[in-house]
Image (cartoon, helix red, strand yellow):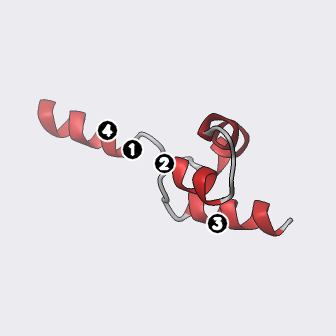
């Protein structure tokens, strides 16, 4: 339960998705990202903002 809480908080705070995977010993970041993706609602927002800025 503590691991789940820590990973959830890290992702909600904007931590890069693979960092919790490495920190908590997952064999693949894909497992962590697949399980916790719902905690990353703003994922991709930096990319969208950059593209929006490019096209005005």
Residue in the picture at 53% in, 47% down: 18
Q: Secondary structure at mark 4?
A: helix
Q: CA distance from mark 2 to mark 4?
A: 10 Å
Residue in the picture at 48% in, 44% down: 43
Asked if labels 1 and 2 touch by Cβ distance under 8 angstroms, the answer is yes
Q: Which residue is mark 3?
A: 9
Q: Which residue is mark 4?
A: 47
Q: Nearer the viewer, mark 1 or mark 3?
A: 3
Q: Secondary structure at mark 2?
A: loop
> In the image, 28: left or right of 14?
right
Q: Which residue is mark 1?
A: 45
- Relative to 48, is 36 above or below? below
Asked if labels 3 and 1 touch by Cβ distance under 8 angstroms, the answer is no
Q: CA distance from mark 4 to mark 1?
A: 5 Å
Q: Which residue is mark 2?
A: 42
- Residue in front for this viewpoint, 39 or 15: 15
């Amino acid at each position: 339960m503590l691991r789940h809480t820590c990973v959830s908080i890290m992702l909600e705070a904007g931590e890069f998705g693979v960092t919790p995977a490495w920190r908590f010993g997952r064999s693949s970041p894909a497992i962590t990202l697949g399980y916790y993706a719902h905690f990353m609602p703003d994922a991709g927002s930096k990319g969208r903002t950059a593209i929006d800025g490019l096209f005005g």
